[in-house]
Amino acid sequence: MTADPPGRNAAAASGVAEEPRRAAARPTHMRPRFVVLLVLLTIGLVPATSATTVPPAQASCAGPVLDLGRPARLPRTGEVTVTGRFFVDGCNDVGVCHGVLGCQSCDYGPPVKPLTDLTIQLHQRGRTWDLATADATGGSGRVSWTFRLPPAARRGAATLTVDGAYADATPVRIG
């Protein structure tokens, strides 16, 4: 037989009902975490809601690109047309806005200018050929070159570049 805890038989003997005891509460760390989260959110929101001038964001305008299929292939003979876009001077994809949301004015700076005198070049086996020169047009800087490959160009790997613009070299296959 097990012994009853002290006082239990005394309460039962006297006819007085004893209330059940609650187990001791385990300490939790929820309240401090909630307070820290609330403080961090408040600190983050105060500058966003109190400013009337929105500073310019960091941006990276799209660089010039040649629109060639994948894989990029150029026919060995006949006329070839290559198009490109984003051949512009300037970048106006970010600006500074003033006022309250919905009633604000934004300044994106001067408009971009299409580049001119863009020469497309073919590079292969240590040689470079100027193929055609054209001017870009419009705000998106679209450009189109039409040319024939030089007779000395061989089948196989080559690259196209555009002199007059900061465009990456584009790998192509002549075939």
Image (cartoon, rainbow, N blue to C red):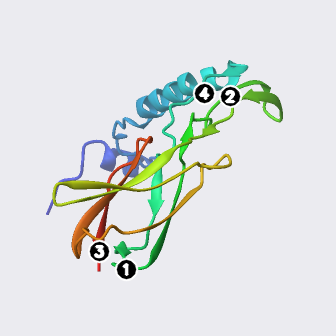
Q: Classify residue 76 as left or right of residue 1.
A: right
Residue neighbourhood size for the residue with mark 1, other residues' Cα within 10 Å, grouped as few (<14), some (14–19), many (≥20): few
**Residue at horizontal 62%, vertical 21%?**
46
**Marks 4/1: CA distance?**
63 Å
Query: Closer to the observer: label 4 or label 3?
Result: 3
Q: Label 2: how many residues lie within 10 Å, few (<14), some (14-19) or many (20+)?
A: few
Per the image, the residue denoted by label 1 is 77
Q: Which mark is residue 110?
A: 2
Between disc 3 and disc 2, the foreground one is 3
Mark 4 burial class by Cα count in 10 Å: few <14, some 14-19, many 20+: few
* Point 51% across, 24% down: residue: 39
Q: Verify CB contact (< 8 Å) between mark 1 and mark 2.
A: no
Task: Say which residue label 3 marks.
Answer: 174
The mark closer to the camera, 2 or 4, is 2
Q: Nearer the viewer, residue 1 or 33?
A: 33
Q: Give the amino acid type for the residue marked by disc 4 in the picture.
A: Leu
